Structure formats: C-alpha cells, structure tokens
Amino acid sequence: MTSSKPLTVGVSLPLTGRFEKSAGVYYDRAYRLWEKQINLDGGLLGRPVELVVYDDESEAAKTGENYARLIDGDHVDLLLGPCHSFLVEAAAPIVEAAGKLLIQGSGSSHELFRKGSRSLFLCWSGCDFDYPKSFLEFATSDASPRKVESIALVYTDWRIGNAVAEGVRHHARAMGIPINFEEGIGDPPVDYAGMMQRAFATKPDALLIGLDHVRTDKPMDEAVTAALAAGFERSQIWLSDNPSPKDLRMGDAMDGIYMRGSWVPEDQSPLSVAFRDAFKDEYGYVPEYHSAGGYACCQVLSQVVASTGGTDAAVMREALLRDSFDTVMGELRFTESGLPDATIQLCQWQGESLEVVYPENARTKPAR
C-alpha cells in the first residue's frame, strides 16, 4: 500500500556564504539528483521523498540551529549531512541528543569519530587519517614498480595536513616502514627548497606530502616543484589531495605522481559510471568527489531504509553496523565508530590521463 504523505529528509547546506559556489553546489545537486531519481523509481517505503533544505550561510552556529529546527520543528523523518567537518561538528551533538542518525559525506576529520558519537556515519572510502594507507599498502606490495622500504613525510601544519601526518605515522608503524625524515610546512614564506633537500638527503624510497586544500597559498605546487628540483622522481611522490584536472596546470611535473582518490570520474564501476552520466545529463558537467560523497550518502540512506522497512534510528543503526552497502564510493561497511571499513583508491597521473592503480578490483591501468 502506498501513501501520498512525503517521507521528509532534512539537510542544512551552505547555499550562501563562503562555500556557496563550492560545497553548497556539490551537495545540493547530488541530493537533488537522488531525490529526482528515487521518486521516479517510486520513492521510499511507498512514499515520495521530499528534501527539506535550509541555508546555513556557511556558518557552524547556523548549521546547528538548522538541524534543531529540522528535528524539533519540522519533525523530518531522516537526515542527511551538511558539508565540511566544522559544520558536521556543529550538527553532531544536536542530532545525537535527539537520537537521530546523520548520514554524511564530507565530515571526514577523524577527530569527529573519536568522541563516542552513535549518530555519525561517514559515507566516504575513508577519513583524513586513512588517506595514506592505500599508498603504503600498494608501495610495499609486489604490484608496485618501486618497492618502498622507507619514506619521508612533509605536511602542512594545519588540520588536514596534521591528520594525514598522524595517519602516515600510524600506518607506517603498523607496516614496519621507517620514516627517515619528517617536517611540517608552516605559514608562508616557506623554504621548500631547503626542506626537500633535507628530505632527499635521508635517501627515502618515497615522499608523502600531506596537504590542506583550503590554504590560500599553493603548497602543492611549491612542494612538488622543490621535490623534483631536489632529486626526487615523480613516481616517488604521493599527494594527499584528491586529483583534479586543475592539477595539469603543473604540466609534465605531475606525470607519474600518485594521489589519493576518494572518488574520481575515471572510476569504471557500474554505479560510478551511472552516477557520472546521470549527473552530467542533469547539470551539464562531470561531478567531482564531494558530489559523489553526497550521492553515496543517499545510496546508503535509501538502502538502509528499504532493508529495515522504516525510519527508526536504532534499528537503522544496527543495520548500518551489520550490513554492507553498494555505493559510488565502493562497497561500504561501517565500524562501531561510524567510520567506513573500506579502501581509498590510489590514483596516478600518467601523462594527461588519470588512472586508478589500486586496489586491483578498481584498477584502470597498472602503475608505472
């Protein structure tokens, strides 16, 4: 039996302010695409899905107010997350106190998941702490053209860079890989040439560079240029940023460099191809990884609602921890913390083409 009463899904997004033209657009369009598709397919639980979206003006305090309004005023059935970790952090205690779930895809700071929350679930292939894990797994395997037995680490001394550095230390220690050199990239001006010369002098097999993409200077450009000048080969370098066509501004310098790939449109999995094509048909351009993360949230949400036959948060949480979910981010299983137990894809620039080189089941070309 179907019902005409909509199943409401509440969300706060930066429709104005600092993130209006970036994350606000990325997530709004991914959520709207899912809403359109799910309703063409008959909705959820026999009911049409209706998004209830409020503008948080790119402000944390407003984000918290919006989720309180969605829960206490609108009594929405379900919630999807905002964007950026500091906005998720503002919403989390409100959602937690209400006994709801927040299925979200951009609050990837591992610190959010160290506070004992039962409400947060991250629908990405990994948090910032885990960005380097896939590179280290690959680089120490027989599939790697260059066997890595020691590494150097440089990182921006900001939130994401520090989290990546912490992850490098953890995963390298677990895999028995010594770190020959470590240094933080402080505020500009930075002596990149001296830093990379010092790193190269320790003779590491690979150089891992943790970055903060929100910095107004260009640490990626400067670090890569200085690393190559110091003597590193491009195939020795891994960058924590998700790859983008904009990286090709650096020309041949990127050829052979590895990057973590939370999601790239080159992914040939059927779900990713279908999402990429549908998004392009709807909006006229190829989506990027934030939009894919938002869409993955919707995929998880619709699957867990369908499998449990309702919107009870406690029942849904049990299913989220028990089951696996097919998404554009790959198969997601969740740990008790709400973080995914998944593998972040490893990408390599090969000329002007971006290839997925790890894991094997997602590989588009071998590494070189």
Image: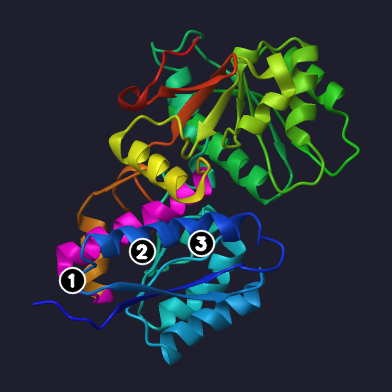
Q: Kindly identify which residue carries mark 1.
A: 45
Horizontal side of residue 151 vs 315, given as left or right: right
Amino acid carrying mark 3 in the image: Asp
Magenta residue span? 288-313
Residue 183 position by quadrant:
top right
Between residues 217 and 111, which one lies in front from this camera angle? 217
- Mark drawn on residue 28: 3
- Of the image marks 1 and 2, the number of the one nearer the N terminus: 2
On screen, 346 above or below 304? above
x, y percentage for residue 93?
49, 77
Q: CA distance from mark 1 to mark 2?
A: 14 Å
Left or right of 130 on screen, residue 17: right
Q: Tag 1: Cα neighbours inside 10 Å, few (<14), some, or many (≥20)?
A: some
Specify the principal SS of the magenta part. Answer: helix
Mark 1 touching mark 2, by CB under 8 A?
Answer: no
Q: Give the camera-side residue of 313 and 83.
A: 83
Secondary structure found at label 1: loop
- Magenta stretch: residue 295 in it? yes
What SS does tag 2 mark?
helix
What's under tag 1, amino acid-wise?
A: Leu
Q: Earlier in the sequence, mark 2 or mark 3?
A: 3
Q: Whole-percent x and y of residue 116? A: 43, 67
Q: Residues within 10 Å of mark 2 (few under 14, many from 20)?
A: some
Q: CA distance from mark 2 to mark 3?
A: 10 Å
Q: Which numbered circle lies on residue 35?
A: 2
Horizontal and vertical percent position of residue 114:
48, 60
Viewport quadrant of the N terminus: bottom left
Report if residue 231 lies within the magenta region.
no
